């Protein structure tokens, strides 16, 4: 049986993990989408290997893995992944899949971001209008992408309109709905959670700035064999087919080929 836990930073430091066959630290966006349930169930059926999933932000996931409290990580922040590789505690790295980040918000779209020519203009419209915006604020891959977009737009958001959830993607989308606010989301979690709440995908244009790439990393010195088996399964024909077919193709398989260089 696959076990899934969510932890805050304090609980993570205090919790003693049981000795399961494989511990996977992963971004909440993969967990919230439901894809991980399907993949790990099929993996267990094929190999008999159980997995414990720790669903946190990418920054936290990599910190857990660096401590040796996870055997592998599934994350989406190429700069942090590259740093981990340089630090020397990653045994192997591969790119599994991608989708896109999108800006979502209230259907009335008070900042009129639907009309923006590019995503940086959309961010500037939100700031100029001081429309409520919910940031993850958790050093996740989505949060780092949001900060990158503000910086490229020449902005440093602050004030009462700029809120931080300090939570995962699903909870951040719920807060955005409650506050009638904008937020940056991955496509999969928006379709799984945000759309059902009534948030609208307002800026969905193809834009290289919004590419969202997911990677798998094996940690040195822990359960390397089991983690390698999971990597091999995810890259196998069956694993990639499951990724590509999930919910009509909300993830696009990469088969180990990185669209965003991790270096």
Image: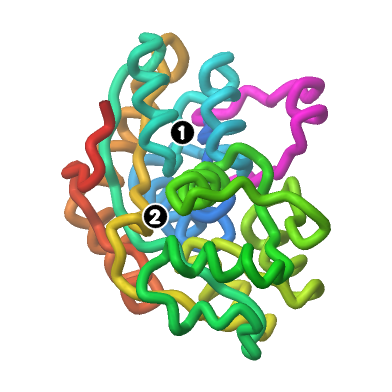
Mark with earlier residue (2, 1): 2
Residue 169 in the image: state x and y as whole percent: 62, 57
Residue matched to label 1 = 73
Foreground pick, 159 / 251: 159
Segment colored magenta: 1-22
The residue identified by callout 2 is 42
Between 155 and 92, the residue placed more toward the observer is 155
Picture residue at 63% right of the left edge, 67% below the top: 128
Whether residue 70 is visible: yes
Number of the label disc, if any, that sits on residue 102: none
Q: Height in image: 170 above or below 257?
A: below
Residue 61 percent location from the top left of the image:
56, 32
Tell which tag, 2 or 1, sits nearer the viewer. 1
Residue 18 lies within the magenta run: yes
Q: What residue lies at 48% left-to-right and 24% top-to-bottom?
A: 71
Pointer 2 local density, CA inside 10 Å: few below 14, some 14–19, many at least 20: some
Q: Is residue 34 above or below residue 17?
A: below
- Mark 2–mark 1 distance (CA, rounded to whole Å): 18 Å
Q: Across the whole image, how many numbered discs are drawn on residues?
A: 2
SS under mark 2: helix
Left or right placement of residue 168 versus residue 73 in this view: right
Q: Residue at x 42, y 65 (%)?
A: 119
Q: Position of residue 194 (x, y in %)?
A: 62, 74
| Residue 84 spot, x, y in % from top left | 41, 20
Residue at position x 53%, y 63% in the image: 124
| 221 falls in the magenta region | no
Q: Secondary structure at mark 1?
A: strand
Q: Quadrant of residue 48?
A: top left
């Amino acid at each position: 049986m696959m076990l899934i836990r969510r932890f805050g930073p304090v609980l993570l430091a205090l919790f003693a993990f049981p000795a399961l066959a494989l511990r996977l630290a992963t971004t909440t966006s993969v967990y919230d989408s439901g894809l991980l349930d399907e993949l790990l169930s099929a993996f267990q059926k094929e190999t008999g290997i159980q997995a414990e999933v720790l669903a946190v932000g990418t920054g936290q996931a990599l910190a857990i893995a660096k401590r040796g409290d996870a055997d592998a990580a599934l994350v989406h922040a190429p700069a942090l992944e590259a740093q981990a590789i340089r630090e020397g505690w990653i045994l192997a790295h591969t790119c599994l899949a991608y989708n896109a980040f999108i800006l979502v918000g209230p259907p009335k779209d008070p900042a009129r971001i639907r009309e923006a020519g590019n995503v940086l203009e959309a961010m500037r419209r939100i700031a100029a209008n001081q429309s409520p915006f919910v940031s993850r604020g958790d050093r996740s891959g989505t949060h780092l992408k949001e900060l990158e977009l503000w910086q490229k737009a020449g902005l440093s958001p602050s004030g009462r309109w700029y809120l931080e959830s300090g939570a995962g993607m699903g909870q951040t989308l719920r807060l955005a709905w409650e506050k009638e606010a904008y937020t940056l989301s991955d496509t999969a979690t928006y379709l799984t959670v945000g759309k059902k709440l009534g948030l609208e995908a307002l800026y969905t244009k193809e834009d290289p700035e919004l590419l969202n790439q997911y990677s798998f990393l094996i940690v040195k010195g822990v359960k390397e064999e089991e983690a390698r088996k999971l990597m091999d399964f995810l890259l196998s024909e069956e694993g990639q087919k499951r990724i590509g077919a999930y919910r009509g193709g909300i993830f696009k398989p990469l088969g180990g080929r990185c669209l965003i260089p991790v270096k």
